[in-house]
Amino acid sequence: MFQAPPRLGTGNLAPQTLIAKRYKIIHKLAQGGMGAVYLVSDIHLYDPLHQREKRLALKEMSEKVFPPDQLEQAVEMFQREARMLAYLEHANLPEVKDLFQDLNKHYLVMTFIEGETLEAILRNKNAPFDLETVMKWTNQLCGVLEYLHAQNPPIIYRDLKLSNLMLETKTGLLKVIDFGIARFQRKRTSKHLKQLGQQENDAGIGTMGYAPPEQWQKGEVTTQADIYSLGVILHQLLTNHDPALTPFNLPNITILNPLVPARLASVLAKAYANNPALRYATITEFQREFMRAWHEEFKGWTSAKGSTI
């Protein structure tokens, strides 16, 4: 094993590299504009008796994408993500294990989630998911969003999309990952973190197609932004339609997938209404209406396992 040299570019850590004299790089899991994630082994917790190693996920913050005058703010946001997650305990969220700086780079250590993102699963399937599967995932996502929104102050995730939802292989649980742009609810200002090449009047924060209109405008963003994004991803799971192709103008679900009852489609359409005033006020209200529509459409319906849903 060898020590990482100072200022090594993000995403370039080689296998066997030792970070902070503790975390051994196994291989890179993913890389995006804001940083890279590696699978690592915690050598402090190695079990020689059973020859077992504790595997974790190491998130490395990218510094090159930010102008020098915004680097300090970027580091603050990275550390804020870690501290925000550190005090959250929910079955659908990863756990923070460590936060540190090593050789001028910033790292976050979390539980390693073995599985695939819903984005990868849908891409490989290349067809809509069945209603029962989507219903079960809907309840999981409503539960974790309700938990986040119930914090004081409420936490708005702001980047709900299929690539940020990991289906854990062992448990079948959905894990909401990457809290990079989540924040506590407050009024938005015109000041926001820009990446290199982004103009001052670029108000957008989030992912086009998934983020609601208010996230691309100056103004107030509330927990209803997450309700919008949830409606969009449920539309995508039920239709295999990429929302980035028609942002703020999703086609009718029942036209793309006639197996979806009109009542359920109507509930989802209200969730992703462009005007926040026309959406559900809370995630609890959305879940209640979704399940009410489900039971009215499938009264007495049971799953393949024989249990009433």
Image (spheres, rainbow, N blue to C red):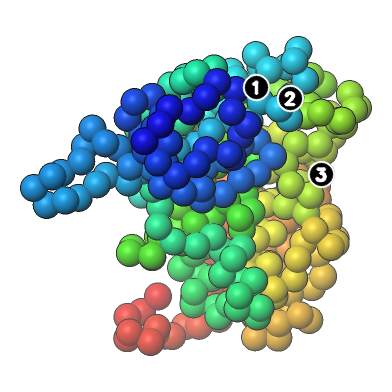
Q: Residue at x 68, y 17 (%)?
A: 71
Please, what is the three-letter code of the amino acid marked with disc 2?
Phe
Q: How many marks?
A: 3
Residue 243 image offset from top left, x and y in percent: 77, 61
Q: Residue at x 75, y 66 (%)?
A: 242
Please, what is the three-letter code of the amino acid marked with disc 1?
Ala
Left or right of residue 267: residue 171? left
**SS class of the residue under badge 3?**
helix
Look at discs 3 and 2 and give the one toward the viewer.
2
Quarter of the N terminus within the rendering: top left
Please, what is the three-letter code of the amino acid marked with disc 3?
Pro
Residue 9 image offset from top left, x and y in percent: 63, 31
Q: Residue at x 82, y 70 (%)?
A: 251
Q: Is residue 156 visible?
A: no
Residue at mark 2 to residue at mark 1: CA–CA distance: 7 Å
* Disc with the residue nearer the chain's start (2 vs 1): 2
Left or right of residue 299: residue 10? right
Which residue in the protein does label 3 denote?
213
Residue at mark 1 to residue at mark 3: CA–CA distance: 24 Å
Category of crowding for the residue at label 2, using alpha-carbon neighbours closer than 10 angstroms: few (below 14), some (14–19), many (at least 20): some
Q: Residue at x 68, y 67 (%)?
A: 236
Report the disc number at residue 74.
1
Viewer-side residue, 177 vs 144: 177
Report the disc number at residue 66.
2
Residue 45 image offset from top left, x and y in percent: 21, 37
Left or right of residue 86: residue 43? left
